[in-house]
């Protein structure tokens, strides 16, 4: 075989921030599929939250650094970690340092739990000022900005988010969140018999403001439609004031499980209509269309807020509806609730779109191409020859 025709496979050292949704979706699942398709060498994975594995690794990382082409890590606020990256560069001057960022850290709102880590001013909530350790947060911001500037490349989830970080680094790629279709494509799961129509929503503790977009509409729909039910999947203590106003007999609160079971749980609940409200602010418009993509992968039509990112992925009138206000939320939800044929048609359209555009198995070659392009960029940290030797 001609040696030139055999392409060298990349060796990636992945350092996810956790083994939950962020780590699994952005790193672990893509790496699993890249390796499965034979596109990369078997990756080395050191979860940053696994203290035992991380401590063992940092004691003698040189051999791994020497064998690694790319260190791919998720945002970390640690001077120790920054020094570890410097050690990697000294051990292997050709190694590429790549940070994965999935949110606009500089636009987090006070309802987000991470706000207390980055906020540079005390928030006012319901007329009360909350005191935050602003001096510490200033250090966090500066450390994060330093890592943005000193990594060889940044990968984000959307082009809009990439643009937000473009002032810190010239080498930025957007790699769209994709779903492992082997986990989401459960079309064989039978739909429930009977006339009940389920509205489904899942989200974490960052989405309380989002529900202001549609809360009144959905509350009224549940009160008037006895055969309509709302299934929430979230944290038990989230948004208690909203929960109290839903009719108890037509509302179920399901606790989050580990991300490994997330797709199975959502398919088991099998909503008929997906809900995707989103507050219109700078933080939200930098997010991906992950939520609407999950509904689409299950063959479910969605009603979503008519803002970016959802108006980029939802095809209004074909795969779902985009609502600008409470009136439109009521209009489109009632339309779908009353018309089963429309729900099934839109759900089929949504599934076709997701299988073509958000299927991880199809998209990982693009991820590998991105990493190959990153291998061609100039290193940010140039180690002096007398130091590197």
Image (spheres, grey):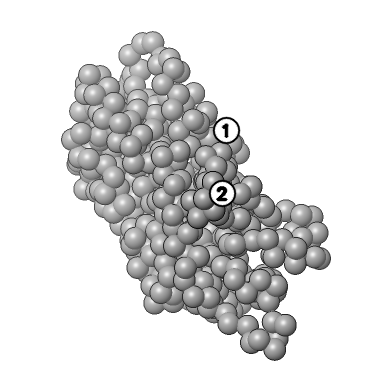
Q: Position of residue 228 (x, y in %)?
A: 34, 23
Q: Is residue 158 left or right of residue 183?
A: left
222, above or below 2, in the image: above
2 or 1: mark nearer the eye = 2
- Kindly state the secondary structure of the residue where label 1 is placed: helix
The quarter of the picture where residue 49 lies is bottom right
387, above or below 276, in the image: below
Say which of 222 and 338 sits in front: 338
- In the rendered structure, find residue 261 and report the number of the disc placed on it: 1
User: Which residue is located at x 38 percent, y 63 percent?
Assistant: 161
* Other residues around mark 2 within 10 Å, as few (<14) / some (14–19) / many (≥20): some
Q: Is residue 238 left or right of residue 276?
A: right
Q: Position of residue 79 (x, y in %)?
A: 66, 75
The quarter of the picture where residue 17 lies is bottom right
Q: Is residue 23 visible?
A: yes
The disc, 2 or 1, on the residue closer to the chain's N-terminal end is 2
129, above or below 6, in the image: below
Say which of 286 and 238 sits in front: 286
- Residue holding disc 2: 40
Quadrant the C terminus occupies: bottom right
Q: Position of residue 251 (x, y in %)?
A: 44, 29
User: Which residue is located at x 38 percent, y 65 percent?
Assistant: 162
- Check if mark 2's residue and mark 1's residue have beta carbons within 8 Å: no
User: Which residue is located at x 41 percent, y 74 percent?
Assistant: 170
Q: Is residue 219 visible?
A: no
């Amino acid at each position: 075989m001609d040696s030139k025709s055999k392409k060298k496979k990349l060796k990636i050292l992945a350092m996810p921030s956790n083994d939950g949704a962020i780590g699994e979706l952005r790193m672990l699942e893509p790496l699993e599929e890249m390796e499965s398709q034979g596109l990369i060498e078997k990756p080395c994975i050191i979860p940053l939250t696994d203290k035992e594995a991380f401590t063992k690794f940092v004691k003698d990382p040189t051999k791994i650094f020497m064998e690694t082409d790319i260190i791919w890590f998720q945002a970390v606020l640690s001077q120790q970690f920054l020094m570890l990256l410097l050690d990697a560069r000294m051990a292997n001057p050709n190694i590429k340092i790549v940070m994965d960022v999935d949110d606009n850290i500089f636009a987090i709102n006070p309802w987000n739990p991470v706000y207390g880590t980055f906020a540079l001013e005390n928030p006012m909530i319901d007329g009360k000022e909350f005191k935050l350790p602003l001096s510490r947060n200033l250090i966090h911001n500066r450390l994060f900005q330093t890592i943005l500037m000193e990594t060889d490349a940044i990968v984000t989830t959307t082009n809009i988010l990439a643009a937000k970080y473009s002032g810190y680094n010239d080498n930025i790629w957007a790699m769209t969140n994709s779903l492992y279709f082997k986990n989401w494509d459960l079309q064989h799961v039978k739909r429930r018999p009977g006339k009940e129509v389920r509205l489904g929503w899942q989200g974490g503790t960052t989405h309380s403001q989002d529900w202001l977009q549609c809360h009144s509409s959905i509350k009224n729909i549940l009160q008037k439609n006895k055969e309509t039910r709302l299934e929430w999947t979230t944290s038990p203590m989230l948004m208690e004031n909203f929960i109290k106003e839903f009719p108890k007999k037509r509302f179920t609160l399901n606790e989050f499980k580990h991300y490994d079971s997330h797709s199975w749980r959502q398919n088991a609940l099998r909503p008929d209509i997906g809900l995707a409200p989103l507050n219109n602010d700078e933080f939200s418009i930098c997010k991906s269309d992950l939520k609407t993509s999950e509904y689409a992968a299950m063959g479910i039509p969605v009603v979503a807020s008519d803002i970016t990112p959802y108006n980029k992925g939802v095809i209004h009138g074909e795969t779902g509806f985009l609502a600008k206000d409470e009136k439109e939320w009521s209009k489109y939800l009632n339309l779908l609730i009353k018309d089963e044929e429309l729900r099934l048609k839109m759900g089929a359209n949504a599934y076709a779109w997701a299988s073509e555009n958000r299927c991880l198995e199809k998209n990982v070659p693009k991820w590998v191409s991105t990493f190959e392009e990153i291998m061609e960029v100039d290193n940010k940290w140039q180690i002096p020859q007398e130091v590197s030797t």
